[in-house]
């Protein structure tokens, strides 16, 4: 998901504006700014680009998730349902809020299985958090219906699917809240950064305060501002926001390029008997940053992945052995390993979960390869790669 592949004069111009003023902080120092407010400008650009009422920038996708937990009222005594295939930040944010992450199986969307979600609901469940992995979406119609039925919050983690959509509505704007990540390897990047998106004005106002130590941002004297509630320093810097401001103007080009190259790879692979592709609830809404496909067995998938790497075809990921993204190796979560004492009730809740009984997820992820789509390929390079991938996988099958 490398937006950094398209770095150029647009990003340099925005960053130079900040460097010339010398104001790297998003708040205060008004006379020195020369009229530059990059964080505010990027927030406005996000609301316009994604057709959402409010956007609050944060220092990372992880702090965007933590902000969402806080402003949506998730905390001690609550359970949040999340998928087995995600990034570790998903459960980190839940635990940081004092809530309990409840992990459930994925389906062939590589996202939350609605049936597994329904089965996991208890009186303590407060939120369902689908994670739109590898550029494509969860089954949002079904998940939204479940949340409506049980009066649960729906938070979309759209960090890996920026620019994707579902039935014409942008991912991250369909639930009660949504989050983006703008780290170095996301669809568009700030280097580091994130955003909380919502159409709920109260959530937004609270996010504005919460991400800046609880400052209410009333008046022109920062030292005299009130603090209605506890907050933290989850602020983005003007430098990071400036990079994002240059990047967001390229989003359409990035998505168009990804979809073109994704289609070239898929056309070559779909001719091979034994390859099937992930389920995409709305194919038009795929942001196409990955092409994810299944092979018949785990053994064949491992062999194919090994062969792809041996043939110089990097950028093909086998998530089953990935420490960041799949539950199998999350021992620190399973054991509640922390540098500081964890709330005893949370520790007990983690110990009671059977983290080793996800046969459906194991079967799906064990047969999945996700192929990264590069923006800087020429059409000829994409076709050459597609042909080489097809020949390599065919030789294994």
Image: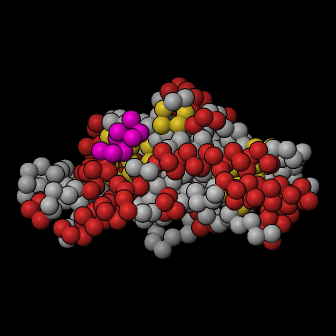
Q: How is the image coloured?
A: secondary structure
In terms of secondary structure, what is the magenta stretch mainly? helix
What is the tally of numbered marks visible in this picture? Answer: 0
Residue 96 position within the rendered picture, expressed as x and y whole percent measured from the top left: 44, 59
Tell me where residue 146 sits by quadrant. Answer: top right
Front residue of 292 and 216: 292
Front residue of 314 and 217: 314
Residue lying farthest to the bottom in this orientation? 339
Residue 112 located within the stretch drawn in magenta: no
> Is residue 348 shown above or below 178?
below
Query: Can you see residue 198?
Result: no
Residue 365 position within the rendered picture, expressed as x and y whole percent measured from the top left: 74, 53
Residue 311 position within the rendered picture, expressed as x and y whole percent measured from the top left: 80, 69
Q: Residue at x 46, y 69 (%)?
A: 341
Q: Residue at x 32, y 51 (%)?
A: 42
Q: Residue at x 68, y 63 (%)?
A: 315
Q: Is residue 25 left or right of residue 383?
A: left
Residue 50 located within the stretch drawn in magenta: yes
Q: Residue at x 28, y 62 (%)?
A: 238
Q: Which residues are magenta?
A: 44-51
> Is residue 311 shown above or below 65?
below
Query: Can you see residue 173?
Result: yes
**Quarter of the picture holding the N terminus:** bottom right
Front residue of 229 and 292: 292
**Quarter of the picture holding the C terminus:** bottom right
Residue 117 position within the rendered picture, expressed as x and y whole percent measured from the top left: 62, 38
């Amino acid at each position: 998901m490398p937006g950094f592949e398209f770095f150029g004069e647009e990003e340099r111009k925005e960053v130079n504006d900040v460097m010339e003023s010398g104001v790297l902080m998003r708040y205060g120092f008004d006379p020195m700014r020369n009229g530059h407010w990059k964080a505010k400008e990027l927030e406005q650009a996000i609301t316009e680009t994604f057709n959402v009422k409010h956007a609050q920038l944060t220092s990372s996708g992880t702090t965007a998730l933590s902000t969402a937990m806080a402003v949506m009222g998730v905390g001690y005594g609550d359970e949040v349902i999340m998928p087995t295939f995600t990034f570790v930040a998903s459960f980190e944010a839940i635990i940081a809020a004092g809530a309990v992450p409840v992990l459930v199986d994925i389906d062939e969307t590589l996202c939350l299985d609605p049936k597994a979600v329904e089965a996991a609901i208890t009186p303590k469940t407060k939120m369902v958090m689908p994670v739109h992995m590898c550029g494509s979406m969860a089954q949002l119609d079904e998940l939204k219906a479940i949340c409506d039925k049980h009066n649960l919050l729906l938070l979309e983690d759209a960090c890996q699917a920026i620019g994707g959509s579902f039935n014409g509505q942008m991912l991250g704007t369909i639930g009660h809240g949504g989050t983006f990540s703008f780290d170095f390897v996301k669809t568009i990047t700030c280097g580091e950064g994130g955003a909380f998106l919502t159409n709920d004005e109260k959530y937004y106002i609270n996010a504005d305060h919460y991400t800046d130590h609880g400052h209410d941002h009333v008046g022109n004297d920062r030292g005299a501002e009130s603090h209605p509630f506890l907050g933290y320093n989850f602020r983005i810097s003007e430098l990071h926001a400036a990079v994002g401001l240059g990047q967001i103007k390229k989003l359409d080009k990035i998505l168009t390029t990804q979809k073109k190259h994704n289609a070239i790879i898929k056309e070559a692979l779909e001719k091979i008997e034994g390859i099937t592709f992930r389920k995409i609830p709305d194919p038009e809404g795929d942001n196409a940053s990955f092409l994810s496909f299944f092979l018949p067995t785990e053994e064949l998938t491992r062999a194919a992945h090994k062969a792809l790497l041996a043939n110089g075809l990097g950028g093909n990921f086998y998530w089953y052995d990935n420490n960041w993204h799949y539950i199998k190796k999350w021992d620190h979560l399973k054991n509640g390993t922390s540098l500081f004492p964890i709330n005893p009730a949370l520790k007990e809740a983690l110990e009671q979960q059977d983290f080793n009984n996800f046969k459906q997820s194991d079967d799906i992820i064990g047969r999945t390869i996700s192929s990264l789509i590069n923006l800087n390929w020429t059409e000829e390079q994409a076709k050459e790669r597609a042909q080489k991938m097809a020949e390599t996988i065919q030789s294994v099958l």
